[in-house]
Image (cartoon, rainbow, N blue to C red):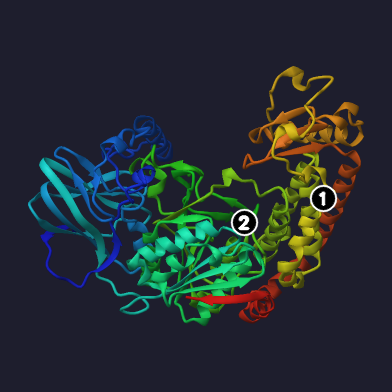
Amino acid sequence: MMTTTQISPTQLRVLQRVILPEAVQTDVIPLYIDSGGATGVQLPTRLDGDASKTIAQATARQDQNTGANYGSAQSSAPDMLSRRSTHLGAGKTVSFGTYFNAFPASYWRRWTPLKSVTLRLETSGQGMVVVYKSNARGVIQRVDAKVLSGPEKTEFELSLAPFGDGGWYWFDLSATTEDLTLVEAEWCGAITPRLGENGGKATVQITTMNKVQYCIDNIRSLGENLDALETVQEILIVDQGTEKVSDHPDFEEVVKPLSGKFRIINQANLGGSGGFARGMFESVNNGSDYVMLLDDDVVVEPESILRLITFADYCKNPTIVGGHMFDMYDRSVLHAFGEVVNPWRTFYDKPHDDMSLGHDLGKSNLRSTHWMHRRVDVDYNGWWMCLIPTDVIKQIGLSLPLFLKWDDAEYGLRAKAAGIATVSFPGAGLWHVSWQDKDDSVGWQAYFHERNRLITALIHSPFEKGGSVLRESLFLDVKHALSMQYYTEEGRLMAIEDLLSGPEHLHPSLSERLPVIRGKVKEFRDAQLKSDFDDYPQPKTTKPPFKGRRNFSSPGYQKLIPWTISTVGRQLFKPVDDLAKKHPQIQLNYSENRWWTVSKFDSLLVTNAEGTGVFWYQRDPKKLRENLARATKLHAKLFSGWAELSRQYREAADRVASYDAWAKTFEKHTESELTR
């Protein structure tokens, strides 16, 4: 039932406030307010035959028609008077059907007892408000409207009944013959928090490693957002770097507003899992209801902290609630809407095939992006921004001591096995350097990728021998070996050797393994990074490959096996070209650095993902033979011993992730504490 009434004082609680960007953040306006029309997927009245095909065709037409829907919106955007208020000139229309301001109705319906939501608006001037909703297919439906005249407070009561599979609520504002001002708006509910009248308190914890300026900026932002601070028990920095946050010249100034709510723990570098586990540990100790884990190299939308805590307060049961990640350098681009672990491949995957990594909401807004209207149920949320109830920590333990990589996915799977849900909550997000701007599958991090992925499979895979994980692991070894990435391959093979030693190596490895891995850099020429192509000999070749054309196409799946056999044979037995020992044959940019291309050469220069330097890869048949033999032998051991290893890691998981086990590790590696 929808009603439109004049507001009188009620017991409604604010669930989500309508917010606007700061004045200097013009590049993120599309995430908050949209000057485009109300467009969505328009389906025919009848769906004959294959309904999914009809929906796909309608979506394709919609994508072609909307394109850059926001287009000229920045030039025609309303005047933003504050973080809560905006002004529209006569004849202007804006929509709040955006990432940060639409109400994610299906998530509230699924995970909380909320039955209806109330939209409250305070306006001044002449105009109209129109309320819309969408369904899981992305179809937009007009719900209600009201003419506005003079100073008014307006309320719409909106049912959540139709949102079983997905859908949002939002509103549009139009100024008619005169200007219109939105003083403030908020989404409210007649609902009591699960944790009591006052709701829960969170420890907001940032793990950092020499990202001092990011930490200072985020501390300053939190200190300026008093509403978010009301829900915060403590802001905790776990500083594992050599450049200390407390040494920054602005440190005392930025922490002053946080008096009594700020602490730094300086500890040895125990990786992301060591830092985040410390946050979990301390949040239990200080009596918090939640810990919110944040990466250090991020820019936080402070309202997101309030929204995650509020939603978690109202969930029917203790629930892990995470925020989404936007691209730091292309700030209207949403990296991922939700993540799952493919149980057969034990790989990161997207919840639905039609969802896209790196979706630009500046070009295709929320209303015209059909897949964002379907509720996404996830296995885990990345620990760039993730709220975990301390009741969950007490029940299933802290992070596994994995140093980094797969700690968040493993924890989500562990929680799921215990009946604890994870929700990636729309409308709560931050900005982070995207995966496209770095490549952590090569170099020292390859050790942790390989070991921790296999540990996750050993503990959580429902399939005998982990499904296809061993086959794909061996194939990755072949790819790195053929790509002349011998340092990366060394780390991967060390990872399997340590894995085979059993779970007792995990806590000691937090402080001991990284120095060993990094210490091997000097042994591998392919790991030596120089800043410029001119730091190396100029490329020369007696016979240009590919008949002199840069045609670096993939062999394709049908030809993959015979092509790989041929390439392995050439690299194993064909002598290295004498000229290639002194000069690289070609230079490739990072986008061309694919194994099917690199493996065609004896010597080449390759730019790294960040664009900050260049590697020189050189083929070494002896090293290739050693790596392939070693990889084959180790994977054979894994295959034959999988059942026993799985038993060991599953039985040890609770013990190594326990409060007591981490307490001993923290006692050894804590350097100092600082309270302000």
**Tag nearer the camera, 1 or 2:** 1
Residue 566 in view (yes/no)? yes
Residue 128: mark in rendering: none
Query: Is residue 218 or residue 62 the one in the foreground?
Result: 218
For the point 26% across and 67% down, the residue is 189
Q: Is 258 rendered above or below residue 63?
A: below
Q: Is 122 rendered above or below residue 311?
A: above
Q: Earlier in the sequence, mark 1 or mark 2?
A: 2
Coordinates of residue 561 in the picture (x, y in percent): 77, 36
Coordinates of residue 169 in the picture (x, y in percent): 28, 53
Q: Amino acid at mark 2?
A: Pro
| Residue pointed to by mark 2 | 343
Coordinates of residue 510 in the picture (x, y in percent): 71, 67
Secondary structure at badge 1 equals helix
For the point 40% across and 60% down, the residue is 221
Coordinates of residue 233 in the picture (x, y in percent): 42, 76
- Left or right? Give the position of 300 relative to 657: left
- Left or right? Give the position of 238 relative to 96: right
Quadrant position of residue 546: top right
In this view, which residue lies farthest toward the front? 249
Quadrant position of residue 569: top right
Residue 296 in view (yes/no)? no
Which quadrant: the N terminus? bottom left
Label 1: how many Cα within 10 Å (few below 14, some 14–19, many 20+) = few
| Residue pointed to by mark 1 | 522
For the point 53% across and 62% down, the residue is 248
For the point 79% across and 42% down, the residue is 526
Q: Is 484 rendered above or below residue 537?
A: below
